[in-house]
Image (tube, rainbow, N blue to C red):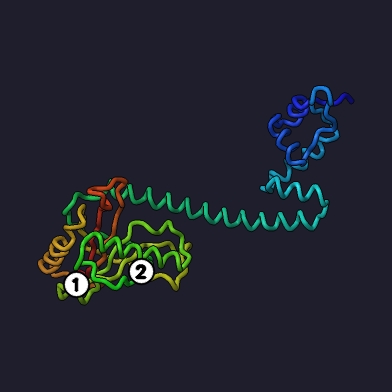
Amino acid sequence: MEKLTIGQMAKLNHVSEQTLRLYDRMHLLEPDSVSPETGYRYYSIKQSAVLDMIQYMKSLGMKLSDIKKHLECKDPALIKSILHQRSLQIDEEIRELKYQKRAIERTLQSYRRYETSPPDGTIVLEYLEERRMYCIDAGMNFYDYGIEEYEEMLRKLKTRLISDNLPQIYFCNAGTILRKDDLERHRMYSSEIFVFVDKDFVADDLTVVIPANIYLCIYCNKFEKEKEYIGHLLDVISEKGYKIVGDYICEVITELPFLERKERGMFLRLQIPIKFS
């Protein structure tokens, strides 16, 4: 058969001329001959077999450098080793994609909740399903300080998340806990900060289960209003004769995609688990 020009070889094998030139430079697939007068590259159709092998190994996710090693040494053990490593790499990529997909789902859920939430200051009774949280004690009373110290608590939370090898998708919508005994005594003390997590993504020994319950909730659009709004909840509990049956939770419904005064924009749901007397 006549020798094929680089354009004919590219068209015959559904690749670009640039690809063939790259393979030539890498010594993956060199032309069958090169005209000394013109410098034109010419290929033999038999070389399509090598090109097929390169494209097949690329489809397995192999790098061109690994393909070159395989073609040079012709050792099946090497290709098995390379493919085994690639399989492990794909498993890791799948795991990361699952985390990314879950992060997107959580963010969309946050925005839906924000868009359908009652206005600021609204008090409602809500049944909340069982939840799991990852929680740390930051060693400082959140209520004695301002937003700067809250950011410091978040840094400690992030450090612990990383040290426990948890997906960074959970470093958002953090909340704080005010324990039941302190709440009933109207003592504003909270050094614990948390994020809600998923059972399938975080080991049980790193999580605390919050049981399903009826919660008295108030929605809040300003960090600075929290103490006042906790008072509103306690007033309603006293008026209605409700019984507090668990810890108070300040949950960030969503972190808004814009910053006010260069600060974190948050919409909160303040919640106290109650029992009807």
- Picture residue at 45% right of the left edge, 53% below the top: 102
Q: Quadrant of residue 183?
A: bottom left
With 130 as the anchor, is 90 left or right in this view? right
The relative height of residue 154 versus residue 97 in the rendered view (above or below) is: below
**Residue type beneath disc 1:** Leu
The relative height of residue 11 versus residue 26 in the rendered view (above or below) is: above
- Picture residue at 86% right of the left edge, 34% below the top: 46
- Picture residue at 80% right of the left edge, 40% below the top: 50
With 228 as the anchor, is 217 left or right in this view? right
Query: Quick one: 200 or 222, which is closer to the camera?
Result: 222
The mark found on residue 183 in the picture is: 1
User: Residue 235: in sight, yes or no?
Assistant: yes
Q: Are marks 2 and 1 in contact (CB under 8 Å)?
A: no
The mark found on residue 141 in the picture is: none
Q: Residue furthest front?
A: 37
Q: In the rendered image, which residue does mark 2 sit on?
A: 135
Query: Quick one: 171 or 35, which is closer to the camera?
Result: 35
Q: Mark 2 Cα within 10 Å, few/some/many (few <14, many 20+)?
A: many
Residue 190 in the image: x percent, y percent?
24, 70
Residue 28 in the image: x percent, y percent?
77, 41
- Picture residue at 79% right of the left edge, 28% below the top: 41
Residue 92 in the image: x percent, y percent?
58, 57
Q: Earlier in the sequence, mark 2 or mark 1?
A: 2
With 194 as the anchor, is 185 left or right in this view? left
Residue 84 in the image: x percent, y percent?
70, 58
On-image quarter of the C terminus: bottom left
Query: Quick one: 139 or 104, which is closer to the camera?
Result: 139
Q: Secondary structure at mark 2?
A: strand
